Each structure stands twice: as structure tokens, then as C-alpha cells.
Amino acid sequence: MVIIHPFKAWRPKSELVEEIACVPYDVIDTHEARKMAEGRPDSFLHVIRPEIDLPEETDLYADEVYKTGAYNLKTMRDRGVLVQDEQPGIYLYQQQMGTHTQTGLFTCVSVRDYDENRILKHELTRTDKEDDRTRHILTQRAHAEPVMLTYKPNENITRLTNSALSASDPVYSFTASDGVIHRVWKVEQTDAFVQAFREVEKLYVADGHHRCKSASRVAELLREGDYGNDEFEFFPAVIIPMDEMRILSYNRIIKTVPEGFPEILQKNFELRKDVHPVPARKGSVCLYMAGRWYGIDLPGDATGDILNQLDVSRLHRHLLLPLLGIENQRTDPNIGFVGGIRGTEELEQLVDSGKVQLAISMYSTSIEELMAVADNDQLMPPKSTWFEPKLRSGLLVHTF
């Protein structure tokens, strides 16, 4: 049984939503955030990337960064840029990217469901990133951004969702700068959805592992005192059925490779030359170096272990570790990652410019593989999945 929790959201005035809504904090760096927020004083980037309002030399983890984020959020509330719902509610959040459409329930979920593995993870979190998000949440007394969760389709929830979509016009509808259309509906009758999710056995973290863990840490800290309410026991999420999720590849780049690397590959794989840059099937990867695309097939795994069968695991076991000496992808400075939304053209540009020597184009991990790994209480290698479209931040904010 999964708990969903209606909440009194702080949300933009309708005429300001397009100006306020922004990309999530973790898909851009500080330089990109500064550029995107330039001339946009109401952008939610000032809350989730508050370092953009401080001198460039400011340490990203300085106290002033967190204080600035809290001040910016309070200012948006005080100015009426964000207005709080009078009654707790839930919303439907739909995104349309080209021919792909996904619709999720925007609500709060339970920290205890996360702690007790009814919300399953598939990725290892880093302590430094946990610390950062925990400080943001505590200083702002808010969960400013939702996580993305998924679940196996449920006929009752699908019926309720379709009925709610047809019952009224969206409260928000706008097209973001990347062409993705975002629509939000308010659900007036929440009890039916609350009851329907009690039929759901478990949820799966798709995107936002560090925000989930940080919400758990915040709750643990606040339980120790007399806080006055238990709203910190919940955090915001957009819950999307698995058959509507879209996963793109998460590609790899290597700064330096051994001399004569194509010959090294030839000794270990059947190396195909001048291939299409996007792998056509699971088990196949494409490699770009010195202006040329190569293709190889990764050896399979006979153990039956779902984790060992992932392409990202097979790549590490048969190429990254033995041929490049990369033991830990999280910490090795020789490897980097590029989301599939950026396309293979960016991989070519990185190699052709001399910034890296090798780019690896991957076949995307499936949502079924993600769920199977989580069900087996295992963790994927880092950067195994890239979900598109990304949730917009600043649409609904949860405070406590």
C-alpha cells in the first residue's frame, strides 16, 4: 500500500507560470543557470540555483548560498508571485514532447514509504549531494522540486486520471523554450486517488534519488524536536505510469585512451567501421574516435543476474575496466557522461574539438530493466538512465 498526501501547494499566478517555471537544478551547471536566468528576476532558478545571485567566486556550499535560496523563495511568496492553495490538493501534470505524451499525478508521497522500501531506488546516492539538498530543504523549509516516480499501470488510476483530464481545463498550459508543452490540472476530489494508490504495492524512483534521500534525512532530523507539524514527513513527486515513461541513452566520454586504441579494440572485439552512431539493439555500442564511428557487440552474461545483463554493466566489465582501467565510474576523472537528449552530434563535437579522445554511444536502458533491478534490491551503475521530458521546477512547491 502506497500513501499519497494532498498538500497546500505554493504555485505561480497563471500569467507568470511561463516566466517562473524552469529546468531542474541538476541538469544545468551554475554558468548555464546564470545565462538562463539573465533578465528573468522571477525565474525559479533563483531558488534552486541561488548561487547565480552571488559573486562568481562564491563557494557553492557556502552558507550564503542556502540563505539566498531561502530569501528568494520567501520574497516570491511575499510579493504574491507564488500563491498558496487554501486547501490541500493534488494535481495532474502532463508533458508533451513531439509525439510523446506522459501524464502523472503531482502529489506528496511518504518519507516512511521511502525508508521502508515501498518507494524503491535503483541508484547509489553521493553523500556530498545529499548534504547539499538537505541543507537547501532545511534552510528553505520547503521541498522546492518534485522527484519523478513510476509504477506499474493500474486500471482504476487510469480511469480516474482520464476522467479528471476531461472534467476541466488546465490551470496552466505553456510551451517551454525547448518546445515541450506543459499542462497542469487541479483535482478537486482527492479521496478517490488516495484510495486508488492504496492498491499500488510500490513505487519506483525514476529521477531524483538525492532529493528522496535528502527528504528522508530532513524528516529524521526534525522528528527529534518539537517541530509543530508533521508535513516534513512528505515530499512532492510526479507519479507517472511506466508505460508512459521515456528513457534515452546516457552516453559516455573518455578524456584519454591508450595509444593505438583501435587496434586494442580489434584484439578484443569484432570491430565494425563506419557504423551509424546510434546503436540499433541491446548489447551493441558505437564508439567515436579520430573522426570515425566504430561498432562493437558486448559479450552477454550467462548468470541470469539482471544487473549483469545491463549494457552499462557489460560495457564496464568488458571495456572500461580491462581496456581503460576505469574501476569506479563515479570517481574516475577520465570518464564523463552526456545525456542522450544532446544527441550524437555533441559526442562528435567533443572529440573533434580535442576535449576528449573517445565517445561511447549507448543503447538506452529500459524501464522494465530499471524496475527489475530495483525489485531485486540492486543498484545500477552511475548514469544508467536519462529520462525525457524533464519535470519543470517552480510549478508546485511544498512547504512545512
Image (spheres, rainbow, N blue to C red):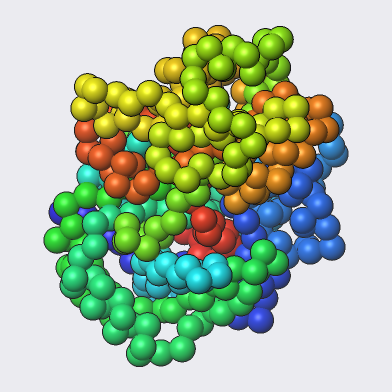
Q: In x, y percent, where is residue 4?
A: 28, 60
Task: Please state, as top left, top right, bottom left or bottom right, where the N terminus lies in the image.
Answer: bottom left
Q: In x, y percent, where is residue 44?
A: 66, 59
Q: In x, y percent, where is residue 164?
A: 33, 82
Let me know if residue 161 appears in the view: yes
Nearer the observer, 269 or 314: 269
Q: How many marks?
A: 0
Task: Please state, as top left, top right, bottom left or bottom right, where the C terminus lies in the image.
Answer: bottom left
Let me know if residue 188 appears in the view: no
Give the residue drawn at x 29%, y 47%: 368
Quarter of the figure with residue 222 = top left
Quarter of the figure with residue 303 = top left
Compared with residue 300, is residue 90 higher up or lower down, i.e. above or below? Answer: below
Q: In x, y percent, where is residue 230?
A: 33, 51
Compared with residue 150, is residue 210 higher up or lower down, i.e. above or below? Answer: above
Give the residue drawn at x 54%, y 79%: 172
Nearer the observer, 208 or 258: 258
Give the residue drawn at x 46%, y 25%: 315
The answer to whether 351 appears left or right of 195 in the picture is: right
Give the residue drawn at x 60%, y 80%: 14
Compared with residue 316, is residue 120 higher up or lower down, i.e. above or below? Answer: below
The answer to whether 259 appears left or right of 96 in the picture is: right
Nearer the observer, 334 or 238: 334
The answer to whether 285 appears left or right of 367 in the picture is: right
Nearer the observer, 63 or 36: 36
